[in-house]
Image (cartoon, rainbow, N blue to C red):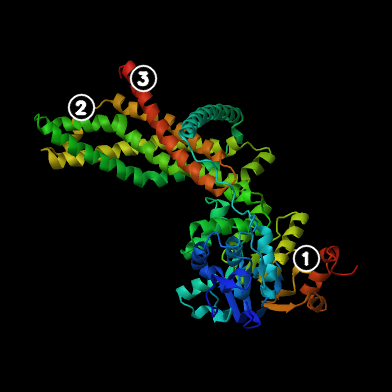
């Protein structure tokens, strides 16, 4: 750009004050031009804007000149001698102006905040009702498929078993092993004060089997597979694949949700069993290292203190958590609307809701087991 | 802006290859200042790749591209960024940032410059919205609240944010109803004339070719044939013949029955 930067000034002509502008009035120099326009005396009695020295102008420059001369206001200053080549642009900008700024929205008040809380509660209630309705639909679809088993989709089931089960083994195993290690380490440290290190085995055994194994597995699966379900179905929703299914008379619940829920019902117990093993192994390794105990002694003591009931208390939760996670994943996926942004939002929501429900139900199970004194 | 060279874009012996598939083989093209050039070609003939190559999203295997007198492959990052502010691109579906409002979308290229005061950016965003024929109230909306035609208009406003000299349009009228498409054609033409733009548009729309394009570039046999509509009508190449003399061309009033 060889043009000279734009300038504007107030000069005294023969018939009074005249505004003069020249140089390049382009977006290149917008910041500087804006300052110059703002620095002009507000109550200048300029009669006219002289533009014969303009070398270049674009819409940003024309807009600044329009602002400088109060176009569209009561005291507008006329333009003169704009070089002919810039006329069409200036006209275009002046017809688009002058009112180009929308009225700013009302500032937020405390009342808006209260209203937001109300709207949030209402939405949460509605969401819970919808989820329950979705569960109902799911039960109906399951009934239909049980009545006619040939309608069940076996290939997707196997694919989802691979994705949610086999592929999750390393991460679930590693996390459970490490938690077993941590439990044993912390437990042994505390119990040593009472000279009861050997109770570490009881503690690790019971906490891993009853709570830690299943809870960690469910949380990992909610983060891994619940989110994947939402993202997969959500993407199909965005590209109208779900609508295409409906028009062919296929029920998305049957085609999309059922194989996923079934897959998770199968894989979550298996993963939990694997997590239990790895957690106990981690605890065992730590006991051998910290307490005077061989691995054989650890296993023997474990066999004495842990009953099959402890194991089943953990395992029985697995299918329930599987249904919760998979249902929430599919439910949020089908709620995706239109944009790719919505897929991201619903995926986040699916993980948060999945984990939340898992923990709520875990608490309910605890109450149930204490009533049944198991 | 005074014309320094008659050509704003000069492409010489461009070669583009993806694996085995050769898309452009020794392609030459001159685009003149102040014209509206329509680029046509069959599906998969490399129209979009040509556009992406000119704007620097795709690095050609061989060949020189001069945009506004600068050889793009020799520019460093800084010089390329400066050059990029001198063209605007409208992608096929607008490619608006979905998490930003219309005003913020239009301001995005301005923010990148870093020195334009916030208030001025607000005003300029409003101005661009009105220049593309939308009500100023649209600035507060999000892309998901807009119709397809409005999205394209906002995309156009964003492409015009920094007052570019060249405007690239990728199928601007695709997906619009005939009335909306005709309006959009007129909008492009009037903006081109009043703002002194050079417009390069990929299009399948025969009506756009007839009504607003000064010249037409046809991508056939991995090269470009360019000419006015009348010149191309006389070209003996079979694809060009069937393109400009087919039933749709007749419907658009190009070819005589």
- Residue A368: numbered disc: 3
Identify the residue under disc 2. Answer: A304
Image position, residue A339 (x, y; %): 57, 47
Q: CA distance from mark 3 to mark 2?
A: 26 Å
When the figure is inspected, residue A340 is found, relative to residue A246, above or below; the finding is below
Image position, residue A159 (x, y; %): 50, 45
Residue at screen point 38% across, 41% down? A220
Q: Are marks 3 and 1 in contact (CB under 8 Å)?
A: no
Residue at screen point 35% across, 42% down? A172
Q: CA distance from mark 1 to mark 2?
A: 85 Å
Residue A78 is left or right of residue A220, and the answer is right
Image position, residue A177 (x, y; %): 27, 42
- Residue B206: numbered disc: 1
Other-residue count near label 3 (Cα within 10 Å), few / some / many at <14 / 14–19 / ≥20: few
The subunit letter for the residue under badge 2 reads A
- Residue A36: numbered disc: none
The quadrant where residue A152 appears: top right
Image position, residue B184 (x, y; %): 72, 60
């Amino acid at each position: 750009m060889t043009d000279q930067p734009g300038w504007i000034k107030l000069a005294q002509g023969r018939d009074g004050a005249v505004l003069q502008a020249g140089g390049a009035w382009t977006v290149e120099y917008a910041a500087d031009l804006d300052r110059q326009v703002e620095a002009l005396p507000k109550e200048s009695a300029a009669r006219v804007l002289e533009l014969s020295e303009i070398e270049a102008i674009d819409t940003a420059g024309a807009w600044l000149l329009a602002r400088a001369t109060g176009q569209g206001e009561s005291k507008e200053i006329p333009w003169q001698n704009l070089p002919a080549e810039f006329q069409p642009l200036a006209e275009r900008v002046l017809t688009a102006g002058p009112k180009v700024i929308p009225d700013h929205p009302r500032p937020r008040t405390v009342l808006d905040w209260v209203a937001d809380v109300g709207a949030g509660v209402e939405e949460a209630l509605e969401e819970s009702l919808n989820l329950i309705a979705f569960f109902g639909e799911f039960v109906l679809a399951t009934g239909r498929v049980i009545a006619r088993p040939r309608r069940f989709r076996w290939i997707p089931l196997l694919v989802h078993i691979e994705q949610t089960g086999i592929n999750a083994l390393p991460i679930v195993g590693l996390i459970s092993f490490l938690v077993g290690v941590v439990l044993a380490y912390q437990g042994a440290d505390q119990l040593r004060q009472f000279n009861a290190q050997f109770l570490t085995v009881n503690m690790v055994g019971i906490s891993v089997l009853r709570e830690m194994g299943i809870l960690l597995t469910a949380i990992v699966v909610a983060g891994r597979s619940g989110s994947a379900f939402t993202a997969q179905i959500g993407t199909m929703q965005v590209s109208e694949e779900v609508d295409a299914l409906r028009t062919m008379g296929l029920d998305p619940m049957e085609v999309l949700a059922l194989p996923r829920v079934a897959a998770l019902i199968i894989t979550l117990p298996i993963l939990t069993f694997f997590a239990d093993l790895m957690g106990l192994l981690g605890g065992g390794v730590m006991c051998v290292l910290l307490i005077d105990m061989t691995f054989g002694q650890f296993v023997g003591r474990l066999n004495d203190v842990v009953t099959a009931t402890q194991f089943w208390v953990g395992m029985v939760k697995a299918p329930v958590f599987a249904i919760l996670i998979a249902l929430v994943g599919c439910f949020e996926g089908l709620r995706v609307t239109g944009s790719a942004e919505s897929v991201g939002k619903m995926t986040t929501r699916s993980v948060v809701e999945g984990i939340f429900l898992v923990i709520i139900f875990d608490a309910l199970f605890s109450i149930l087991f204490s009533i049944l004194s198991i | 802006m005074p014309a320094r060279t008659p050509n704003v874009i000069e492409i010489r012996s461009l070669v583009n290859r993806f694996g085995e598939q050769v898309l452009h083989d020794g392609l030459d093209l001159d685009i003149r200042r102040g014209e509206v050039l329509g680029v046509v070609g069959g599906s998969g003939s490399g129209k979009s790749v040509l556009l992406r190559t000119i704007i620097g999203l795709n690095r050609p295997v061989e060949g020189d591209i001069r945009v506004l007198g600068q050889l793009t492959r020799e520019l460093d990052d800084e010089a390329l960024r400066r050059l990029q502010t001198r063209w605007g691109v409208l992608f096929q579906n607008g490619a608006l940032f979905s998490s930003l409002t219309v005003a913020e979308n239009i301001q995005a290229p301005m923010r990148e410059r870093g020195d334009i005061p916030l208030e001025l950016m607000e005003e300029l965003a409003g101005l661009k919205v009105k220049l593309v024929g939308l009500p100023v109230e649209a600035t507060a909306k999000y892309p998901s609240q807009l119709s397809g035609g409005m999205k394209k208009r906002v995309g156009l406003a964003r492409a015009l944010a920094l007052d570019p000299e060249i405007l690239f349009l990728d199928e601007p009228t695709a997906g619009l109803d005939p009335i909306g498409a005709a309006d959009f054609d007129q909008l492009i033409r009037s903006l081109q004339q009043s703002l002194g733009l050079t417009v390069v548009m990929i299009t399948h729309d025969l009506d756009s070719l007839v009504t607003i394009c000064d010249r037409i570039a046809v991508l056939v046999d991995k090269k470009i044939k360019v000419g006015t509509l009348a010149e191309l009508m006389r070209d003996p190449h079979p694809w060009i013949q069937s393109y400009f003399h087919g039933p749709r061309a007749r419907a658009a009033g190009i070819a005589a029955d």
